[in-house]
Amino acid sequence: MRDVGFGYQGGAPLLSNMTLSLQPGMFHFLTGPSGSGKTTLLRLCYADLIPTSGQMGAFGQDLRGLDRDGIAALRRRIGVVHQDPQFLDHLPLAENVALPLSVAGEPVDMDALRDLLGWVQLAGHARALPPSLSGGERQRAALARAVILSPDLVLADEPTGNLDWEMSMRLMQLLIELNKSGKTVLVATHDLNLIRATKAQVSARVLRISGGTLHLAGADL
Amino acid sequence: MRRDLKGLNLRALWRGLVNGGEGGKGDRIVPPTGFTAQLTLFSAAAMAFLAVFALALALATGRLADRWSQELAGSVTVRVSAAAAEQEARVQSALSVLDQTPGAGAPRRLPQDEVAALLEPWFGPDMPVDALPVPALIELPVTGRDFDTEGLRLRLETEAPGAVLDDHSAWRRPLVSAAQRLRFLGIVSLLLIGAASAAMITLAAKAALAANGQVIRVLRLIGARDITIATAFVRRFTRRAAIGSTIGTLAGMAGIALLPDATAAGGFLTGLGFQGWGWLLPLLIPFIAAGVGFVATRWAALKMLGAVR
């Protein structure tokens, strides 16, 4: 993104002159106080919002020029994990995790799906319906769903916001493993302890939003 | 986006209609909605049932109007009234005029027993018709387009006094007009039933789409195309409309088939039903209902998806 600005309709500009380039294969943190625009920045990344100014691109495409099919194709290359992940509550967990494959018209490899559920430690919950899962299980299921199409970029918006410390670290461990397998990861969080604990295990770039602009942080962490 | 939706995959829709059950693979992304499903099925069945009767009415009144029109144009009657001593001479004069009338077949004087049969409903079987001053009746078939009713009436007035031409129009024309209006009303009823069905299916589809707003948002976020989401909803509602209307159509056809037959009911009711190939016409109703369901749901899905990025 270059010189990107954004403001919600009827509100003051939230982001202004924001320039950012994610390094492929790098682990990134996006931090800042609540309401600073972390979620908005992530939504701009997966074309859920359109910037009011500046240029926004991903994988060599101008996001502002994408039609609806183009946006769908972009989202298959970006895995997103939300703080409060949503599922299709009438489908078992395994089908929810495999949903990106189904809607993309791709066959589901049951062995690979089992391996993926095992990786997020949910193999025993394959037939469970989402409402019966705990917060930590939902976050790990959301992560599994986000990576099933092997995306180039994984975005996580306050993924540990509703989890205790132990569960938060388990989830971060999975994100670190993903990053070590070559995926670019961007995690938005206001939890500095989480950032410090993660940085102890992986090289991470920390970006801070404040006052509507983006700064490189690190020395103060 | 709208271009995409206009290109909804008809082949996939047909495959889904024919092969996929309610829980078909593509449909599983749409949660089962018991009440909406039953509402759509019931509405489609009720509307199809009514459509069968409206269609039967339109066809029956159409046949009635055609038959009466043909009979109206098919023959005329000449009534010859005169004193008993002069009647035979007047009848002969009238027959002479009728014989020379262009566009008319051979005139036939109704024999006394046929005249008696016509009067029987009013006077009973034992009335001595010979004793009454009953006019002679002559039936004249109309065979050509050059038959001139007004010209013949004028000739009879001058060449056969007492002979009056009756082309049956006085009593048949209002009936034909009524039958034609009934046919028109039947067609209007069919159109209204179709429009009401579309409205009900649209409402049910919109309710289902609104209730599944979260599902649609999740699907968009994981990269589902509009066509994938819309097709799942469209297929489900099209199938419900088709199944409901098939049930309603078959019930309606059974009802028509069980109506009393011609000899038992008599009169107008003898024609209310389907004849020959006409029995195939109501079988089109489920296809039309499926089409209505398809268009209505597609429209609703198009509007709903437009609001989700």
Image (tube, coloured by chain):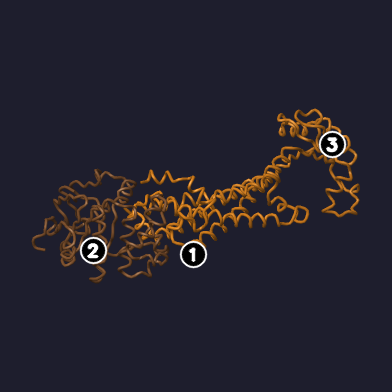
Chain colours: A brown, B orange
Q: Residue placed at 28% from the left, 60% from the top?
A: A81
Q: Position of residue A85 (x, y in %)?
A: 31, 63
Residue identifier under label 3: B108
Residue identifier under label 1: B34
In the image, which disc is placed on residue A129? none
Extreme residue in the left direction: A219
Q: Quadrant of residue A158?
A: bottom left
Comes first in the chain, label 3 or label 1: 1
Q: Position of residue B72 (x, y in %)?
A: 72, 40
- The residue carrying pointer 2 sits among few (fewer than 14), some (14 to 19) or many (20 or more) residues within 10 Å by Cα, namely many
- The residue carrying pointer 3 sits among few (fewer than 14), some (14 to 19) or many (20 or more) residues within 10 Å by Cα, namely some
Label 1 chain ID: B
User: Could you tell me which secondary element the residue under label 3 belongs to?
Assistant: strand
Residue identifier under label 2: A158
User: Could you tell me which secondary element the residue under label 2 belongs to?
Assistant: loop
Q: Which is more foreground, mark 3 or mark 1?
A: 1
